[in-house]
Image (spheres, rainbow, N blue to C red):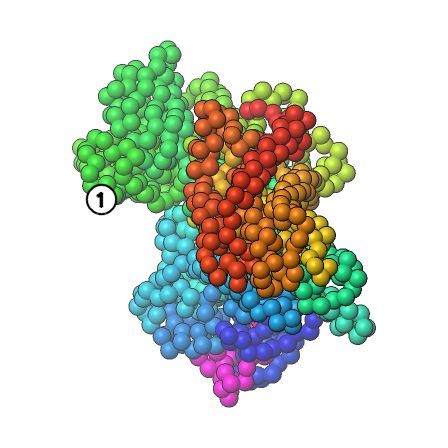
Amino acid sequence: MGKPHSSSSSNGQSLGSVEGITDLDEPPCSGQLPAAPNSHNTNLNPTSADPAGGLAAPTPPSSSHVKSQSSLLNDKPLKASALQSISSLPSATVSENSATLISSAESACSAASTAGSPPHSLPALDVCKDLQTDPENGLSAAEAATRLQRWGLNRMELTKGTSKLQILMRQISNSLTVVLVLVTILSFSIADYVEASVVTAVILFNIIIGYWQDSRAESQMLALQNLASSTSTAIRSGQPVEIKSDTLVIGDIVRISVGDKVPADIRLVDGINLSADEAILTGESLPISKHADRILPGHDIPLGDRINLVYSGTVITRGRATGVVVSTGMQTEVGKIAAMLRTRKTVDKTAPFSERFVRSFKTKGRSILGLDGTPLQNKLSKFALLLFGLAISLVIIVFAVNKFDINGEVLIYGICVGVAVIPESLIAVLTLTFTVAARSMSSGNVIVRNKASLEAVGGVTNICSDKTGTLTQGRMVTRKVWLAGNASATVADVTDPFDPTSGTVNWSDSVGNTVTSIPGQSEKRLSLSHSEDFVKFSQAISLCNNATVNVNKNSDESSSAGNTAGKHEWTATGEPTEIALQVFAMRFGRSKAEVLANHNISLAKEHPFDSTVKRMSVVYSSPNTGSTIYAKGALEALLPLITSSDAEKSVISAQADKLASEGLRVLCVASRKINPGEDLESRDGIEANMEFLGLAGLYDPPRPETRGAVEQCLRAGIQVHMVTGDHVKTATSIAYEVGILPKSLPPSEIGTKVMAASAFDGLTDDEVDALHALPLVIGRCTPQTKVRMLQAMHRRNAFCIMTGDGVNDSPALKQSDVGIAMGMRGSDVAKEAADMVLTDDNFASIVTAIREGRRLFDNIQKFLLHLLISNIAQVILLLFGLAFKDHDDTSIFPLSPLEILWANLITSSFLAVGLGMEAAQEDILLRPPQDLKVGVFTKDLIRDKFIYGTFMGGLCLAAFTSVAYSSGSDLGADCNENYNSSCDLVYRARSTTYATLSFLLLVTAWEVKHFTRSLFNMDPTEWTGPTAVFKTVRKNRMLFWAVVAGFIATFPVIYIPKFNEKVFKHHSITWEWGVVVGSVVIYVGLIEAWKAVKRRFKLGEPASMPLMEKA
């Protein structure tokens, strides 16, 4: 168990230690007030009880901050009865199961705060008094500065990032680099300085490319953390001042209003009609009404029920308020969850020294060999070690053939064979390919935080997506209206919920006649049979409304009046439901501003929405027509207050049930004339005997692109699940609309396809596993439900994406295979826990990421196959080349060391980079996900590399033989290191072999663009005959010019005098080009024949698609 301790920290707060959490400011328990060091005893026991019943104050952060006989607040001791100690949490081990992180925090806090009084249980003025702050004048500037210096900035302490040195070491620590370093050492040891220099340059190039890419990625990750509210309005010395939010301190008096992001945990002092969207913290999709005067006794009040507090990171949706800051930074509710997520493996210091030494040795060894990276990096590191073992074996074979008479030439030949096995450019090519993939995802609104997710996302089999703002637009729309005269309206095809000109309105009157209202048209187009009813209804929803909807007319100055649809940027502030109603009224020229101006009326009284009565009402007065009350609210709240008959009320209730069954949130609207002399202050009096005007059904509409994206997922073998905090009926309606639930779903299966979280959580693991398929929709979802869903998927060997935006989604994001957070509305903690961040919060962007992940996987296979074909061909050539003996019975090199390095580093590298930039194949989302357990080294790739490598190696061997033995069997003497008159034939044969190898590698780059399709028919949908090959090779311009450059570069290497002889150990050739061209023709024929066999017997083709239900 970790022991509490105090130490100085960067933000000057007392540090505690909980096993599994390190380097972390101790977060105080929820709702407890932090204490300053007690002036009478600056070395109190952190856990000792104060005589007044609270916890004693903690040891100060460091002695340098403590003045004699002084405390934090105005140099006076605080009332300990209301203060919470910032001492360490009780020693506890943080559960490794992410699902228990939040509950662990709550239980730890509960144990630590039983003696204190949380702010939600105290009157606001008592909280201010205990914090020694003036609710009217706030803190003085000097006092605020003192508290800021003592307790630090109001800032989340997220990941500090990776240092430059760590990034550099990460590039050095991998198996392939280790192997190349050994090759360099051997080359220097035998004075082969040219080869040693070339390999050293390769190592440096790999390191530079990797360092550059990882540094860019690290910068992007750190930039994601700068997402907090920038400024706040605080009362300092009696004056409102605009300050940076991170300089707020405990005890500050802060003003908040609609649209503000709450900068800290705040106990409300007063407020008017205040509501806050706490979805990121509690998961509740609807705003919560807040009341400063409520006192909630007890320590274990759920966060969502603490209606006299607003929390850091939440958003004010209505009203305004003043409050006192009670927690900042890592002490806030958001900070505590962030702290619990920052777990790190601890070293068991009680274990024997030998055991700890072995464990440490293994860890460091894995790090040096690059076996602690991403899954692909680990596989490639293991592959590099395998190649190194193979290289050693081949060197031994070379020595054995020469009877272990190891002279300089034999040693050089052995190194050549070893170098031929190793794909020296693999690291650089892989890094560049990842860079291209990350940039491509970024342009598709996906920021990659964890490089491993680039590899993983292509193998996803299931997506668990939130509804609000991801599948839907995150904005309410008035979907249906039913008026008192039995007329109805349906809004369709809305692309921008804030734009009153977006979409159409289909009206149906009481006898079934229909008319469609064109966007922007007035109510004059409506049928006369319901025009008067609609005027009353639209006027009521417009006036009984505090939302504002505006258009930025400067966003498109070129647009003309009357043709603004889709051209202007519309914005809105206020409650989502009120915005939706205001937009609906504006569709017909009845915005609040227009109604007020046209009818010469003014607001006389407002009774704000109250969660206890579930309604809101306003009274408007006119000098000409008197006063009218307009009310809206829940049906059950207004139905008893209207004058309709029981039969009419039954019809109204039936219509409301029908709208609710469609997943709509139903509001009732009513009004009446106020009699002269009525008391407007008497809410019960004036909100009676009202006339029913109509019902409004609202919902959060799907994004236009969501259904298509869901269908793409189904075609790609990926099942989409909706896990949402919304009501099951609402979730079901949207699921049908976007295609998650098929329209043909039999009623008998709805019970297992759609479940409430309570029902799902009530099942045992065995019962969940016994289900034929996991639910497609789970409503009223909790964070624990999401984690349990992931665990159930993992037991079925599924590979899952989980999306989330709230702090409470963080455990599920951590435990998913690929966690994706929302960038626009997501919390900092969710982004910290995620592998990827969507900058547009759009489900379709997830499909973009999957497409890019699959493209990355395909392209890695392509360039890996190309590099390995080259290596196998060279090994075959050099091993069989041992049989070519000169006059001194020394093996002749079919390729010189520099020719091998040139082919591997220059010719192959640019081709591999080009293959890494291949566009996604047209069927990439028509195949099932790849098996990530197998990885890139599939049976098909392994088989093809040996077959193609054998073809290439055999033809290179034939090319050397046909020239070297064209005039007999005389291979000269001492032709490996220097040229003499007896070496002309060998040097020409070596040139021919080099040209053959180069040209075959260039052709191979085009052939491996697809593993089964013919080079002459890569895209069957666009085949125009044999000439289609020219279109195929030009599609990837990077690869095309790499091949062209490769062909051109072959000639100067062969023909530049002295350079060809001294450096590459070969000569110019003439008639031998016939051998080269013949080899290319034969090679292409062999590959096309093999591909035909694969197509005929369906070798290497994707497995058949899983049976997916069509929506």
> Which quarter of the picture shows residue 936?
top right
Amino acid identity at mark 1: Asn
Question: On screen, 77 above or below 1008?
Answer: below
Regarding residue 1031, the answer to whether it shows in the image is yes
Looking at the magenta stretch, what is its main secondary structure?
Answer: loop
Rendered residue at 45%/77% (across/down): 149
Rendered residue at 32%/69% (across/down): 238
| Quadrant where the image shows the N terminus | bottom right
Residue 63 in magenta stretch: yes
The kind of secondary structure element at disc 1 is: helix
Residue 437 position in % (x across, y down): 50, 48
Rendered residue at 45%/24% (across/down): 1024
Q: In this image, 832 relative to 1090: left or right?
A: left
| Quadrant where the image shows the C terminus | top right
Q: In this image, 285 relative to 790: left or right?
A: left
Residue 546 position in % (x across, y down): 33, 42
For label 1, the crowd category at 10 Å Cα-Cα, with few meaning under 14, some 14 to 19 and many 20 or more, is few
Question: On screen, 840 above or below 746?
Answer: below
Q: Which residue carries the number 1 mark?
A: 554
Residue 760 position in % (x across, y down): 67, 37
Residue 237 in magenta stretch: no
Q: In this image, 423 relative to 240: left or right?
A: right
Say which of 387 and 611 sits in front: 387
Question: On screen, 448 above or below 1040?
Answer: below
Residue 98 position in % (x across, y down): 65, 53
Q: Which residues are magenta?
A: 59-86
Count the marks: how many?
1
> Which quarter of the picture shows residue 8?
bottom right
Most extreme residue toward the bottom is 68
Say which of 486 and 1001 sits in front: 1001
Rendered residue at 25%/34% (across/down): 564
Say which of 155 and 388 sits in front: 388
